[in-house]
Image (cartoon, rainbow, N blue to C red):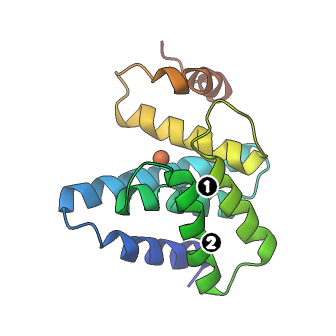
Amino acid sequence: MDRIHAVENMAFTILDEIGDEVEKMEAIAHLSGVAKFSFLLASRRSVNPELAYISGILHDLYAFTHERKEHALHGSVLALGVLKSLNTFNDDEIDAVVMAIKHHSDKKRVHDPLSEVLKDADVLDHFLSDPFQSPSVKDYQRYRSLKKELGINLP
Ligand SMILES: [Fe+2]
């Protein structure tokens, strides 16, 4: 099994903790959406697309299975456990994904390229899940830059 599918299988098994089927579907839709946008943005920006996809799959796992409060920090610890348990990632790869997840809620600051890919993919998925809604104030600057980068012709 490739590494992306190994992480996905483990993440989706963890999501089974969610009793409510609709909530579980929303979680899978968001995590998969962010993973795909992360892969796309990483490919454009010469960032490792496999690690970007994996960051997307894991980034809100804690928020969906526990709570949103401090979910970036707690989620980075959860991701560390998942990645270590798979025994297929080296320390640098694990550090990169864990850092991206730790930073992903801090949308106003700029961090390393993988963290930036994950934050932008999160904004894109929020926006495209409800494209006729204006982006939130905290996401607005990123949304504007992404529209320019990707040539999205919308207000
Ligand atoms: Fe998210």
Task: Return the residue found at the far top.
Answer: 155
Indicate the position of residue 112 as horizontal and vertical percent values.
78, 46
Q: Residue 101 has which mark?
A: 1
The residue most toward the front is: 69
Left or right of 37: which side holds 116? right
- Give me the residue at 61% from left, 27% from top: 142
Q: Which residue is mark 2?
A: 80
Horizontal arrangement in the rendering, residue 78 relative to residue 96 (left or right): left
Q: Residue placed at 36% from the left, 53% from the top?
A: 29
Q: For label 2, count other residues whose C-alpha is less than 10 Å away and answer few (under 14), some (14-19) or many (20+).
A: some
Say which quarter of the image contains residue 128: top left
* Pick the front one: 47 or 13: 13
94 shown above or below 131: below
* Frontmost residue, 90 versus 50: 90
User: In the image, residue 77 lies at what x, y percent?
Assistant: 59, 67
Separation of marks 2 and 1 at Cα, in angstroms: 10 Å
- The reply to whether callout 2 and callout 1 are in contact (CB within 8 Å) is no
**Residue placed most toward the observer, 45 or 107:** 107
Quarter of the image holding residue 20?
bottom left
Point out residue 31 in the picture as x, y percentages from the top left corner.
45, 55
Which residue sits at x=42%, y=55%? 63
Q: Decide: is 138 above or below 16.
A: above
Q: Position of residue 27 (x, y in %)?
A: 35, 56
The disc placed on residue 124 is none
The amino acid type, in three-letter code, at marker 1 is Ile
Q: Which type of secondary structure does the marked residue at label 2 adopt? A: helix
> Image quadrant of residue 141?
top right
* Amino acid at pointer 2: Leu
Foreground residue among 118 and 138: 138
Q: Quadrant of the N terminus?
A: bottom right
Give the mark, 2 or 1, whose residue is nearer the N terminus.
Answer: 2
Residue at 67% x, 45% y: name it.
Answer: 117
